[in-house]
Image: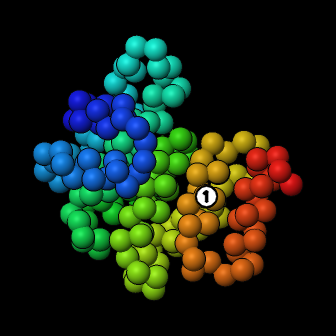
């Protein structure tokens, strides 16, 4: 698992391509495999020479979440990927939430607007936003807002609020 996640994390990041690469790995989707991949998010492998850990850790977290995102495809309800990615999204509010949010946004693209899995993912992302701290720095805020803004289902008022918050957090207001 460590070699698989490290290989993915060490390649050029483009999420659709990472998902294709993850599909090529010999992954046997299971709760045990999901736990191993989630463990990589907390206990990362050492970074390659010359890469600082603060750069390597988010790459590993995105790679692990990406590997999980292909579990049980195309199933969603009751799937290992649904359970694991929602657990990360709902878990400790740290950098791993960014990985879960962005990857869930990509998984949502597998479904048409109005499909139950897509609506559920959007609802979970909205809930994460609603529970986000209202003061101070939140490390996953930009990733979460960028992911939410990829959903054309947002009404104009909600879209404007997310765009405004994203601009404000970037100091562009």
Specify the quadrant of the image occupied by residue 153. Answer: bottom right
Residue 119 image position (x, y, % from top left): 47, 78
143 left or right, relative to 159: left
Residue sitting farthest toward the right = 173
Query: Vertically, is 30 above or below 62?
Result: below
In-front residue for pair 47/116: 47
State whether residue 113 appears in this view. Answer: yes
User: Mark 1 — residue?
Assistant: 146
Q: Secondary structure at mark 1?
A: helix
In-front residue for pair 90/19: 19
Residue sitting farthest toward the bottom = 114
Residue 45 image position (x, y, % from top left): 34, 24
Residue 149 image position (x, y, % from top left): 61, 66
Q: Quadrant of the C terminus?
A: bottom right
Q: Quadrant of the N terminus?
A: top left
How many discs mark residues in the rendered view?
1
Residue depicted at 26% across the width and 47% down the height:
21
Query: Vertically, is 46 above or below 139?
Result: above
Q: Residues within 10 Å of mark 1 (few under 14, many from 20)?
A: some
State whether residue 91 appears in this view. Answer: no
Residue depicted at 32% across the width and 38% down the height:
8
Specify the quadrant of the image occupied by residue 109. Answer: bottom left
Residue depicted at 29% across the width and 71% down the height:
76
Residue 105 image position (x, y, % from top left): 47, 63
């Amino acid at each position: 698992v460590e070699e698989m996640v490290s290989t993915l994390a060490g390649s050029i990041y483009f999420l659709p391509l990472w998902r294709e690469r993850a599909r090529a790995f010999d992954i046997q989707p299971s709760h045990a495999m999901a736990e191993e991949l989630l463990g990589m998010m907390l206990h990362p492998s050492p970074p390659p020479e010359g890469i600082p850990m603060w750069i390597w850790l988010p790459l590993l977290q995105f790679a692990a979440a990406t590997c999980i995102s292909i579990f049980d495809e195309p199933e969603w309800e009751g799937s290992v990927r649904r359970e694991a990615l929602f657990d990360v999204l709902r878990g400790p509010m740290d950098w791993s939430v960014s990985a879960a949010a962005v990857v869930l946004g990509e998984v949502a693209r597998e479904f048409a607007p109005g499909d139950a899995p897509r609506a559920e993912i959007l609802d979970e992302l909205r809930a994460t936003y609603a529970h986000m701290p209202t003061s101070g720095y939140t490390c996953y805020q930009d990733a979460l807002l960028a992911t939410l803004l990829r959903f054309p289902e947002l009404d104009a008022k909600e879209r404007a609020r997310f765009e405004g918050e994203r601009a404000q957090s970037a100091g562009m207001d």
